[in-house]
Image: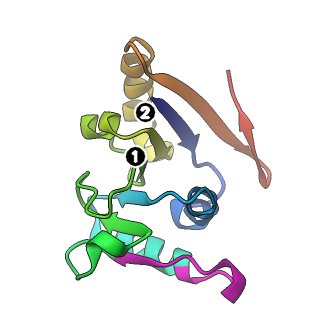
Amino acid sequence: MQVDFYQLSRDPVEQVLPAIASRILDLGERLLVVADDAGRLARISEGLWAGSPESFLAHGRAGEGRDAVQPVLLASDCHAANGARHIAIADGIWREEALSFDRAFYFFDHDTIEGARASWRALAKREGVTPRFWRQEGRKWVQGP
């Protein structure tokens, strides 16, 4: 199981997540996006809609109907009603349930960096878990040590 840690230092998650979601959908897969804050989920939803018509990212909010058919489902918990095998943790709060997915994207910022460090240390010791770290350098993402 791979866990990609993304340190948000330049752009907020609602600007970064659409590129990840697009790559997942291009693979024919589905994505579950988790955040405990309704406002953050609303901003992520706006970010997913904000692209050009060619980059349209269909998505829905959990509990608003048709959860099972959503390519990208926004939720406050790790229940993948859309059958997603990829999860994006968008609020910097690690959830152990993410380990039941094939791949996790863990976004954190300055306010949640201590929790991310603790999660990195714990996950690095787990059998079958491969953590990778990504940081922003200008407009690019660079894999760290």
Q: Which residue is mark 2?
A: 116
In the visual, does 58 lie left or right of 91? right
Whether residue 93 is situated above or below residue 21 in the rendered picture = above
Which residue is at a point 71% across and 83% down the rendered structure image?
Answer: 54
How many numbered discs?
2
Residue 33 in magenta?
no
Location of the C terminus (image quadrant) = top right
Which residue is at a point 66% across and 55% down the rendered structure image?
Answer: 10
Mark 2 surroundings within 10 Å by alpha-carbon count, few (fewer than 14), some (14 through 19), many (20 or more): many
Which residue is at a point 26% across and 34% down the rendered structure image?
Answer: 96
Q: From mark 2 to mark 1, how far is it between C-alphas?
A: 7 Å
Mark 1 surroundings within 10 Å by alpha-carbon count, few (fewer than 14), some (14 through 19), many (20 or more): many
Proximity of marks 2 and 1: CB atoms separated by less than 8 Å: yes
Q: Which residue is mark 1?
A: 92
Q: Nearer the viewer, residue 133 or 70?
A: 70
Which residue is at a point 25% across and 62% down the rendered structure image?
Answer: 81
Q: Of label 2 and label 1, which has the lower sequence position?
A: 1
In the visual, does 69 lie left or right of 144? left
Residue lying furthest left: 63
Quadrant in which residue 38 is drawn: bottom left
Q: Nearer the viewer, residue 125 or 117?
A: 125
Q: Where does residue 22 sit, x and y in percent of width and height?
A: 61, 64
Residue 53 in magenta?
yes
Q: Amino acid at mark 1?
A: Gly
Q: Where does residue 72 sit, x and y in percent of width and height?
A: 43, 67
Quadrant in which residue 4 is drawn: top right
Q: Where does residue 80 sit, x and y in percent of width and height?
A: 28, 56
Q: Amino acid at mark 2?
A: Ala
Q: What residue range appears in magenta?
A: 49-60
Q: Where does residue 91 sit, x and y in percent of width and height?
A: 38, 53
Location of the N terminus (image quadrant) = top left
